[in-house]
Image (cartoon, coloured by chain):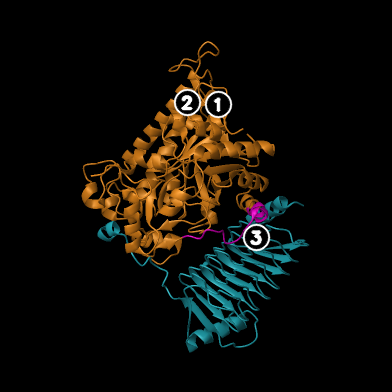
């Protein structure tokens, strides 16, 4: 079965109102379950390639295995659960919904994120939350260098070590209420422990050019 | 007094240094490059005489319809004229301007294109054929919107500022625009240069497959490149599976760019088309993967020359805005007072104070552009260009714009001969080969 035939079958099953769709032996193929814009449940048994469950609006997708790059890219709404590790750019530019990574994630987790929640039970790589705009990234383990580089808004919570902060990122003390909410969220996702999360937000120093030209000063 | 002017330390160079000494950063402006470059005016058509016979210029039929991106897409993009409106964002432009452009495109049977800010619902409604851009920023990217598009365009680079992302000053990032981009209102938005989910050409192949799956293989996938290393980039984009490649040259326009990029990066439109044509030919995909050229297209002659050099279609930006009234001294505007420059010289799109209601989000200024009247002007202009294109095509003895070829052209300068790979007028010599 080609990827095209597989996705066509999934969309046809969703259109017919199938409650639950099970995909077996995905063989780490790219682009499985892409562009589904209706509520449904999809279970993928095995590891998957790039762009799995991307461009979705509504479905609940669970994957038993590892995933390649850009899992859940541009998720609008719905939920994606991955049992093991994710490659680079997990949740890239996601705008809503929830994503859970049971293992660790590669570089650029939550890059250009615009909403929703990305929860990573393990570690994540460098440039986590790079240029993120909104939403929450919760990493229970450690993150690599340049965390939160050039982020606009949104929050990154890190349970263990931070390699380094990126440009314009800063630490902020989480409130006790925030921590309690985060721990409850971990419990709901089946993650043990109550880490004292570090919170990373934007310094907002890159929001504006410092100066304007003579003519611009008279206009803006 | 000693007369003469210094070529190195010209008045504008002195002013540039003064400005940067005040500013402490690179300068920003709109429009396009100020560099002197070889352009379409350096080429001329060799119309018919005794060796070939013309078609009746004002009567006989000349086909201007083109089909783009038919290599893999179930529904290629069919345009009644090989000229469409390029991607310009809602944010850089007012909603009225975007709506007018969409309407104008529909009136003449061509397409308009979204831009770096997502899809404006009013443009979708107005434009029968909408090209939906997927940019590095992914501002406003919505699979529900993408599913309604007639083509998808992955933007790798932009001719006015290749190798960097979009720029939208905070004065234009007002509430609605900010919300559609998920940005804090009022920030000076500097878009990313790289896509968040793929890096090289091997990844791009997977990305293209993803977008095909997301749109059920129905519509063409274009890849837009800033014209720099054209030959290699075109081959890589074609190999990655693009149905159409848009080559956006250094002459192309913008609503805001660092001036240093506008004037010192990229290559002009003429050599960009030729390099892209030869690259596609080399890998056996010329006329299979569609080639679209943009950058400095002003009239039907520019379109005809671009097609003769090897493009299947062209995209226009600044020309469409000028047809909308950009730089026109309309009664409601006072350019000198409002923008500090006379009508005809304005390049202050980035300030958001556009006196004609095009490149602004100011509610009062926006009112100066009536979308219906604007659409009519742009449609008239598109029709004029198409008629000029057909007139030139007939004068070359051809009844279809797709029959235009390099042999129809000669170069007026040695540089143009080398770049266009056509003979210098009065000689049989093609310079540079």
**In the drawing, what numbered circle is on residue B423?**
1
User: What is the quadrant of the N terminus of chain B in the image?
Assistant: top left
Which-is-in-front pick, marks 2 and 1?
1
Q: Is mark 3 on a helix, strand or loop?
A: loop
What residue lies at 65% left-to-right and 44% top-to-bottom?
B235
Q: Are marks 2 and 3 in contact (CB under 8 Å)?
A: no
**In the drawing, what numbered circle is on residue B44?**
2
Task: Pinpoint the chain carrying mark 2.
Answer: B
What residue lies at 38% left-to-right and 50% top-to-bottom?
B30
Q: Tell me the shade of chain A.
A: cyan
Structural crowding at the residue carrying mark 3, measured as other residues with C-alpha within 10 Å and reported as few (<14), some (14–19) or many (≥20): many
Magenta stretch containing residue B137, yes or no? no
**In the drawing, what numbered circle is on residue A51?**
3
Region of the chain picked out in magenta, as a range: B191-207
Chain letter matching colour orange: B
The Cα atoms of the two marked residues, 2 and 1, are separated by 11 Å
Towards the viewer: B223 or B275: B275
């Amino acid at each position: 079965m080609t990827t095209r035939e597989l996705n066509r079958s999934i969309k046809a099953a969703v259109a017919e109102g199938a409650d639950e769709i099970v995909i077996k032996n995905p063989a780490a193929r790219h682009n499985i379950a892409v562009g589904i814009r209706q509520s449904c449940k999809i279970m993928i048994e095995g590891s998957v390639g790039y762009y799995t469950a991307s461009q979705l609006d509504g479905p609940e997708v669970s994957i038993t295995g590892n995933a390649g790059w850009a899992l859940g890219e541009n998720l609008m709404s719905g939920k994606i659960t991955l049992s093991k590790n994710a490659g680079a750019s997990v949740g890239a530019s996601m705008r809503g919904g929830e994503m859970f990574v049971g293992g660790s994630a590669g570089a650029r987790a939550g890059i250009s994120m615009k909403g929703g929640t990305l929860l990573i039970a393990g570690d994540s790589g460098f440039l986590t939350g790079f240029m993120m705009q909104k939403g929450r990234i919760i990493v229970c383990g450690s993150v690599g260098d340049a965390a939160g580089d050039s982020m606009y808004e949104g929050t990154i919570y890190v349970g263990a070590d931070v390699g380094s902060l990126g440009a314009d990122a800063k630490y902020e003390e989480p409130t006790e209420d925030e921590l309690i909410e985060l721990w409850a969220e971990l419990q709901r996702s089946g993650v043990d422990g109550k880490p004292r999360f570090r919170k990373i937000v934007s310094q907002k120093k890159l929001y504006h050019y410092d100066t304007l030209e003579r003519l611009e000063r008279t206009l803006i | 007094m000693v007369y003469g002017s210094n070529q190195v330390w010209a008045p504008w160079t002195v002013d540039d240094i003064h400005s940067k000494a005040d500013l402490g950063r690179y300068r920003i402006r709109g429009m396009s490059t100020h560099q002197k470059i070889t352009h379409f005016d350096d080429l001329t058509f060799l119309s018919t005489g005794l060796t070939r016979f013309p078609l009746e210029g004002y009567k006989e039929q000349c086909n201007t319809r083109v089909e783009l991106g038919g290599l893999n897409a179930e529904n290629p993009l069919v345009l009644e004229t090989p000229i469409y409106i390029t991607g310009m964002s809602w944010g850089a432009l007012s909603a009225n301007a975007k709506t007018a452009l969409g309407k104008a495109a529909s009136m003449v049977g061509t397409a308009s294109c979204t831009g770096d800010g997502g899809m404006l619902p009013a443009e979708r409604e107005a434009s029968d054929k909408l090209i939906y851009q997927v940019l590095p920023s992914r501002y406003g990217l919505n699979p529900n919107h993408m599913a309604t598009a007639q083509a998808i365009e992955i933007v790798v680079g932009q001719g006015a500022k290749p190798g960097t992302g979009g720029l939208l000053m905070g004065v234009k990032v007002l509430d609605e625009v900010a919300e559609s981009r998920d940005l804090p209102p009022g920030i000076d938005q500097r878009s990313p240069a790289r896509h968040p989910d793929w890096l090289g050409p091997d990844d791009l192949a997977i990305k293209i497959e993803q977008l095909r799956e997301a749109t059920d293989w129905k519509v063409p996938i274009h890849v837009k490149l800033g014209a720099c290393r054209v030959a290699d980039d075109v081959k890589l984009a074609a190999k990655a599976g693009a149905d159409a490649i848009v080559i956006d040259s250094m002459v192309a326009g913008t609503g805001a760019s660092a001036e240093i990029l506008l004037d010192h990066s990229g290559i002009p439109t003429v050599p960009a088309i030729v390099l892209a044509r030869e690259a596609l030919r080399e890998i056996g995909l010329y006329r299979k993967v569609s080639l679209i050229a943009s950058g400095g297209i002003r009239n039907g002659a520019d379109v005809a020359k671009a097609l003769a050099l090897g493009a299947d279609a062209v995209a226009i930006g600044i020309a469409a805005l000028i047809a909308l009234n950009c730089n026109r001294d309309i009664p409601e505007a006072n350019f000198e007072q409002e923008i500090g420059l006379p009508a005809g010289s304005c390049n202050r799109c980035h300030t958001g104070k556009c006196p004609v209601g095009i490149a602004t989000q100011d509610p009062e200024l926006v009112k100066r552009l009536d979308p219906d009247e604007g659409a009519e002007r742009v449609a008239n202009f598109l029709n004029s260009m198409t008629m000029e294109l057909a007139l030139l095509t007939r004068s070359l003895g051809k009844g279809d714009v797709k029959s235009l070829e390099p042999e129809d052209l000669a170069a007026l300068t040695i540089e143009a001969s080398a770049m266009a790979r056509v003979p210098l007028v009065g000689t049989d010599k093609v310079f540079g080969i």
